[in-house]
Amino acid sequence: MTILTLQMSLLFLLLLSLTTFHKTMSTNEHRLVQCNEKDQETLLIFKKGINDSSYDKISTWSTEKDCCAWEGVHCDNITGRVTELDLKQYLLKGEINLSILELEFLTYLDLSLNDFNVINIPTTEHNITHASKLFYLDLSGNLGVDLHMDDLQWITPLSYLKYLNLSGIDLHKETNWLQALATLPSLLELHLIECKLNNFMTNPSIEYLNLSSLLTLDLSFNNFSSQLPKGIFNLTKDLNYLVLWGNKIHGEIPSSLLNLQNLRLLDLSYNQLQGSIPDGIGQLPNIRHLGLYSNMLSGSIPSTIGNLSSLHHLSIGYNNFSGEISEKTFSKLYNLDSLDLRDSKFVFQFDLDWVPPFELQYLSLSDTNQGPTFPSWIYTQKSLQVLDLSSSGIALVDRNKFSSLIETIPDIILSNNSMTEDISNLTLKGNYLALDHNNFTGELPHISPMGVSVDFSFNFFSGSIPHSWKNLKDLQYVNLWSNNLSGEALVHLSNLKKLKILNLGENGFSGTIPIKMSQHLEVVILRGNQFEGDIPLQIFNLSDMFHLDLAHNNLSGSIPKCVYNLTQMINSTRNDPSMAVVELFTKGQEYYVQNIYTSRQTIDLSSNNLSGEVPLELFQLVQLQTLNLSHNNLIGTIPKTIGGMKNIESLDLSNNKLCGEIPQSMALLNFLGYLNLSCNNFNGKIPIGTQLQSFNASSYIENPNLCGAPLKNCSTKEENPKTATSPKNEDDDSIIESLYLGIGVGFAVGFWGICGSLFLIRKWRHAYFRFTNGVGDKLYVTLIVKLNRFHRN
């Protein structure tokens, strides 16, 4: 055993020595291959154009370290020459210096998804054509607002280029872009998305261009406003993917399109194409994706579409199609998994027993006439991930089939129908659930923990929020507006940490507003319920909040005095569409908003029992557009700082106990479109300003000591009710006697002067009677207003 052990030990030492020797040799060999000095110099020139703020991303780029070990740099293991530069999504700022193309062995360059703001193209005498073997070039997706190129001539020497992506770069000055790209004989894939291109070419001889190698062409989101040139589809016959999405291309679909027999994806959506779909489109044997969505196409659907057995995605909604669609239209579409016929005027004639040959994952029939009965063929689709049947006239459903269908679909949109069903026993497993504007009854259904967005507004749900909703940890959006719900809703929802939109308006919910709520809340609507107690201080410290509506409840106490941290209402520059669908009450009226924007800042605390002074901090929310504190018991004055609320459009402080003068600074509120200060104790003169005088008297009435346009004029001298007393002397008496005498004489002269004229002049007499009649009417209106105020108090 000892000899065997010794032999094994020697063998192990031998293997260890060989391994160490191999590693040493490999290390020495690697050290012998160092980064080329010229390549390193070129990389450092590129680095100089990058701002200091982003240096941390390429901090390894230092002469103290071999450039082949720099972040994003790849070298050939034998020659040490730089072959790849991949700086995708490094958040780099500054300039793209295209002298980087002097790396003569560079084959791969990706600078996409950064924050560059300028492209530096060296002059022609400075040779940048060394990267002759470059086959991949991606400069797309940069956030710089001024990233543009005036021409593409620098690209013509890159004869090996196979992939080119310049999406997001402004190329509107390059009018011959197509000719420049036609000089790249190896180009397979071209992406010029959102490049502000406005024409296909200035030279009409498009048929002489050659892009025979091109397989993918994506020109989405440009400014093309012409017809498609007749020869555009003759440039290459091997094209697989053609996307012209989101332009203004008009005219008919050219028949030359049918030459692209290898086409797998064709998307011409969001243009202004007219005419009908060519019958020959059914002769494209390999087509898998056909997108003609949102154009002005008309006529009926060619029956040949039913022959596209390879078709997976069909999107032809938002056009002017007509005619009949039946099971024959889809008879051979065995592989169809996405169907979009939104906003179509088709007459749907499906046999009640029809079972489609396909299993859809996505189906949208919104704004079509499917009703009144739920289409029976949809019940057969067991793989649906998205179902949109909004505004499709459906009222009647098969209870059992309907329940089993909607329970399993992740994204379901049934908005704006007339479905009447009790779904309280269901557990909906969807992420996005929109069942709003229907007639659903019973209690709210249970929702699986994967729920993200729930809209059950405008139904007849009753009862309280299920306890299981406490477990919806990913829930971001809840809209239960206008139902018959009750109970302490916020007990179940206050711990949902990701909640952004909370709309419980127009129900019968009760309880208090909890101190702890989601810190991500952007919209809170508790309007028209029975919530009571104080408004918690914490609700004014939600930095993302831009819409707060607590109106028409039983809230009491004072508005919290604190350092308001409503960042969105102080210095927000965002104007993002929110997922919120809300009823806005502003400018004295109600209106429905589909997508509220973060720029519309609102606080509505009206019709509660709030008391105390209005916090000064509330008037420092300079981004606020709507503020409604009416119908409370608030006291105090309006601070001068209100003049800093430059964006305010609607201000309602009516029916409170506010006092003092209206600040002169309010005359600076140039966007004010609605103002109501009535039924308070304001005094003094209404400040003179274009906006404040543009409102009628109803904005200021029932403030007894308030005057000035549009109310009655203020007296030139203020009367002092308490005249100072002093000893009377004879001089005073004589003055008073003279005054009385003068008054008597003046009265007699004035009386006979006017009355005599009234007796003698007929027109004056009629004018006088009309005047006294008007005064009587005004006195009567004033009396009625006073009586109403007396009864209200």
Image (cartoon, rainbow, N blue to C red):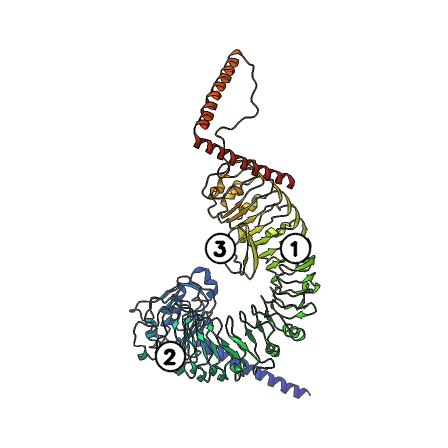
- Tag 2, which secondary structure? helix
- Tag 3, which secondary structure? loop
Q: Which residue is mark 2?
A: 233
Q: Report whether 283 appears left or right of 183.
A: right
Position of residue 305 measured from the top left corner of the image (x, y, whole percent): 48, 81
Q: Nearer the viewer, mark 2 or mark 1?
A: 2
Q: Which residue is mark 1?
A: 516
Instruction: Pick whichever, 767 or 630, lies toward us.
Output: 767
Relative height, residue 577 to residue 156 (above, below): above
Calculate the distance from the C-alpha at mark 1 to the C-alpha at mark 3. Answer: 27 Å
Count residues near mark 3 (Cα–Cα under 10 Å), then give few for <14, some for 14-19, many for 20+.
few
Residue lying at 66% horizontally and 88% vertically, measured from the top left = 4
Position of residue 775 measured from the top left corner of the image (x, y, whole percent): 52, 35
Query: What's under tag 3, amino acid-wise?
Result: Thr
First reached walking from the N terminus: tag 2 or tag 1: 2
Residue lying at 67% horizontally and 63% vertically, measured from the top left = 461
Q: Which residue is mark 3?
A: 573
Relative height, residue 387 to residue 585 (above, below): below
Position of residue 497 measured from the top left corner of the image (x, y, whole percent): 63, 60
Residue lying at 55% horizontally and 75% vertically, measured from the top left = 362
Q: Quick one: quadrant of the C terminus?
A: top right
Q: Which quarter of the figure has residue 248?
A: bottom left
Residue 292 visible (yes or no): yes
Calculate the distance from the C-alpha at mark 2 to the C-alpha at mark 3. Answer: 45 Å
Query: What's under tag 1, amino acid-wise?
Result: Lys
Count residues near mark 1 (Cα–Cα under 10 Å), then give few for <14, some for 14-19, many for 20+.
few
